[in-house]
Image: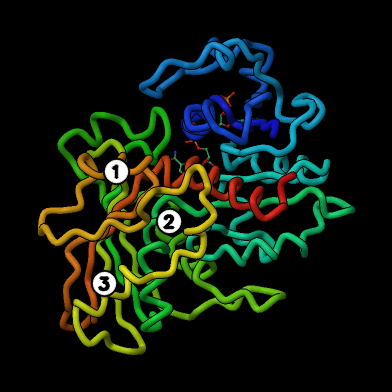
Amino acid sequence: MNVGILGATGAVGQKFIRLLVKHPWFTITALGASQRSAGKPYAEAVNWIEDVPISDEIAHLIVKECTPEALGSVDFVFSGLDSNVASDIEACFAKASIPVISNAKNYRQDPTVPLLIPEVNPDHISLISSQDFSQDGSGWIVTNPNCIAVPLSLALKPLHDRFGLKNLSLTTLQALSGAGYPGVSSLDILANVIPFISAEEPKIAPETQKILGLFNSTLIERPSFTVDATCTRVHTLNGHMAAVSCRFSIKPSSVEEVIQTLKEYPNPIANLNLPTSPAQLYYLYEQQNYPQPRLHADCDKGMSLHIGRIRDGDFFHTNFVCMAHNTIRGAAGGAILNAELLHKKGYLK
Ligand SMILES: NC(=O)c1ccc[n+]([C@@H]2O[C@H](COP(=O)([O-])OP(=O)(O)OC[C@H]3O[C@@H](n4cnc5c(N)ncnc54)[C@H](OP(=O)(O)O)[C@@H]3O)[C@@H](O)[C@H]2O)c1
């Protein structure tokens, strides 16, 4: 399929390009960015921050403005657009019958737009049929969640299904790459922790509740668990970590039952052989000093979830630490996996 990338010059856009260059199903044929970049060869427009060279065919592509007319014939687009402009541009593509797989936050809370993690809520893609961006339904939008809601939801799904989540408390340790480029000033973050990330905490409850919601064939019924979140920026490069505490409706009988529940989770896309799926979804660690972003974030294409420190609590029933690669599993890689699922299910054709 011929694919366009909106926001191709940004940090997420670059990750899309890197991950898609050798993709077996999707070929990048168009790149879009702002007027500042349009008209230039990609290599000239971009400040490339990936640690592999730009492939020749991409380097010479001329960047276009983000309109369906300028991008030309594409089967669908990935969006890594700045959220200040994503609403209008993404709607414009959907209206022009070009499906949008978006990484931006703008449509995540639209009740007709799936907030998709293929291993967690693949049935939510049926929401697409209730969208009215285009007259005949051929243009639509699917989003992937915020980069910390992804590891959190992946970890909580088996536990919520089995024990019923009531109260959630978490503190995140989020990597520098999550702030985009140039991101946080070096003088602020060097040898430091910043105990606040603008606009991050308010996303966690609504996104996690929507992802873990039950699709009742019309809309998503959201579970009503409470969430207290503290988001911090730490001096790591890739890999968002969260220290999580949960109370459930049903108290797990033991730590072993929690571990068993995670191990036995029936991954709903396990048999689809999607190219971006990790060989192993959950890595569970017994070592007390694991997981670690530097050691584990890139493991299994950067698409796995790493869980450790699983233990009982006093007030909370279960505590654990989880971690996933924020710009791969939590951004571009997650969006590509969404597109692969949508292709396999016949929505992208
Ligand atoms: N960074 C992450 O880890 C991460 C994780 C999850 C989600 N996100 C979300 O993903 C999106 C992209 O993040 P980012 O860090 O890649 O941002 P970024 O580096 O600032 O890139 C933004 C992109 O949007 C383009 N753009 C800006 N204004 C435009 C306009 N008026 N018309 C068309 N294109 C325009 C930019 O093009 P020019 O270069 O031409 O200005 C650039 O390609 C954001 O919505 C962000 O919230 C980011």
Residue placed furthest toward the right: 135
| Residue that badge 3 annotates | 245
Instruction: Please say if 61 is above or below 260.
Output: above
* Residue at left offset 11%, top offset 54%: 289
**At x 59% / y 37%, what residue is drawn?**
81
Residue type, numbered disc 3: Ser
Marks 3 and 1 sit apart, C-alpha to C-alpha, by 22 Å
Residue shown at 40% from the left, 24% from the top: 50
The location of residue 200, given as percent across then percent down, is 42, 54
Q: Residues within 10 Å of mark 2 (few under 14, many from 20)?
A: many
Tell which of 207 and 250 is nearer to you: 250
Residue 150: assigned label: 2
Where is ligand 1, by quadrant?
top right
Element under disc 2 = helix
Q: Nearer the viewer, residue 204 or 218?
A: 218
Residue 333: x and y in percent read 48, 42
* Image position of 220 with respect to 101: above or below: below
Rendered position, 214 above or below 345:
below
* Earlier sequence position, callout 2 versus callout 3: 2
Figure quadrant of the N terminus: top right
Q: What residue does disc 1 label?
A: 297
Q: Ligand 1 closer than 8 Å to the CB at disc 3? A: no
- Secondary structure, mark 1, is loop
- Give the residue type that dot 1 points to: Ala
> How far separated are the C-alphas under marks 2 and 3?
16 Å
Q: Quadrant of residue 307?
A: bottom left
Question: Crowding near pointer 1: few (<14 within 10 Å), some, many (20+)?
Answer: many
Residue 209 vertical position relative to residue 65 in the rendered view, above or below:
below
| Circle 3 crowding by C-alpha within 10 Å: few under 14, some 14–19, many from 20 | many
Q: Position of residue 191 (x, y in %)?
A: 15, 36
**Numbered disc 3: secondary structure:** strand
